[in-house]
Image (tube, rainbow, N blue to C red):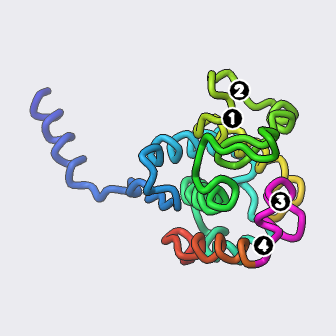
């Protein structure tokens, strides 16, 4: 019996691996010490709360990520992390403690508490939207609703641009898109 078990283990070790290497996440906030926790929080949120968004191919996906249609779920999630890291540059310069309009907009992606409540975001962290991971999880819920509703990443005032004005500005949108197009997953 031991010989059979050894033979099975030996033969299985000779089989070619079908497992894909883990997806590489490139984000514009990679210079921040929190980057790994932010990437992890957003990846988990995308796989959980953004699943419907990850399942569709927005009509303007080629503008941001020419390889999006062919990407697997994790690759698509990596694209969204990169997009939001680029957007956070314009919203908060990657500062999770940023406050705009006298505190009406909070954190990395400048989310209003009212919008967070509307999207049933979990704000139980003592820092609320000023906690980077909480802010990104909430942004995922907001984006998933807008992208699945509008069928676009950010076109005009649709998709992510519905809630984040920097993506309505052509030069800022192009800057974010240039970064995401450079991702390996977006090469197609």
Q: Which residue is mark 3?
A: 159
Cα separation between marks 4 and 1: 29 Å
Tell me whether the residue at label 4 lies in contact with that at label 3, contact meaning CB atoms closer than 8 angstroms: yes
Q: Secondary structure at mark 4?
A: loop
Camera-near label (4 vs 3) is 3
* Sequence order check, earlier mark of 2 and 4: 4
Cα separation between marks 3 and 1: 21 Å
- Asked whether 185 or 178 is in front, the reply is 178
* Sequence order check, earlier mark of 2 and 3: 2
Q: Which residue is mark 2?
A: 123
Q: Position of residue 151 (x, y in %)?
A: 85, 62
Tell me whether the residue at label 2 lies in contact with that at label 3, contact meaning CB atoms closer than 8 angstroms: no
Q: Quadrant of residue 186?
A: bottom right
* Sequence order check, earlier mark of 1 and 2: 2
Cα separation between marks 4 and 3: 10 Å
Q: Which residue is mark 1?
A: 129
Q: Secondary structure at mark 3?
A: helix
Q: Position of residue 37 (x, y in %)?
A: 48, 40
Q: Secondary structure at mark 2?
A: loop
Magenta segment boundaries in residue numbering: 153-170
Q: Which residue is mark 4?
A: 60
Q: Quadrant of residue 135?
A: top right
Q: Position of residue 158 (x, y in %)?
A: 88, 62
Task: Tell me if mark 1 has few (under 14), some (14-19) or many (20+) residues whose alpha carbon lies within 10 angstroms of its own.
Answer: many
Left or right: 51 in relation to 112: left
Task: Tell me if mark 3 has few (under 14), some (14-19) or many (20+) residues whose alpha carbon lies within 10 angstroms of its own.
Answer: many
């Amino acid at each position: 019996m031991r010989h059979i078990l050894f033979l099975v283990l030996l033969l299985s070790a000779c089989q070619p691996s079908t497992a894909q290497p883990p997806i590489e996440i490139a984000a514009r906030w990679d210079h921040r010490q929190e980057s790994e926790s932010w990437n992890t929080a957003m990846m988990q949120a995308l796989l959980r709360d953004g699943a419907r968004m990850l399942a569709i191919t927005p009509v303007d996906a080629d503008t941001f990520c020419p390889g999006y249609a062919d990407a697997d779920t994790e690759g698509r999630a990596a694209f969204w992390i990169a997009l939001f890291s680029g957007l956070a540059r314009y919203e908060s310069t990657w500062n999770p403690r940023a406050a705009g309009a006298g505190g009406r907009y909070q954190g990395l992606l400048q989310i209003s508490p009212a919008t967070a409540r509307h999207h049933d975001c979990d704000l139980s962290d003592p820092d609320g939207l000023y906690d980077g991971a909480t802010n990104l999880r909430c942004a995922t819920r907001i984006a998933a609703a807008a992208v699945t509703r509008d069928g676009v990443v950010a076109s005009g005032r649709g998709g992510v641009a519905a809630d984040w004005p920097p993506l309505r500005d052509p030069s800022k949108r192009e800057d974010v898109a240039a970064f995401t197009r450079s991702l390996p997953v977006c090469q197609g």
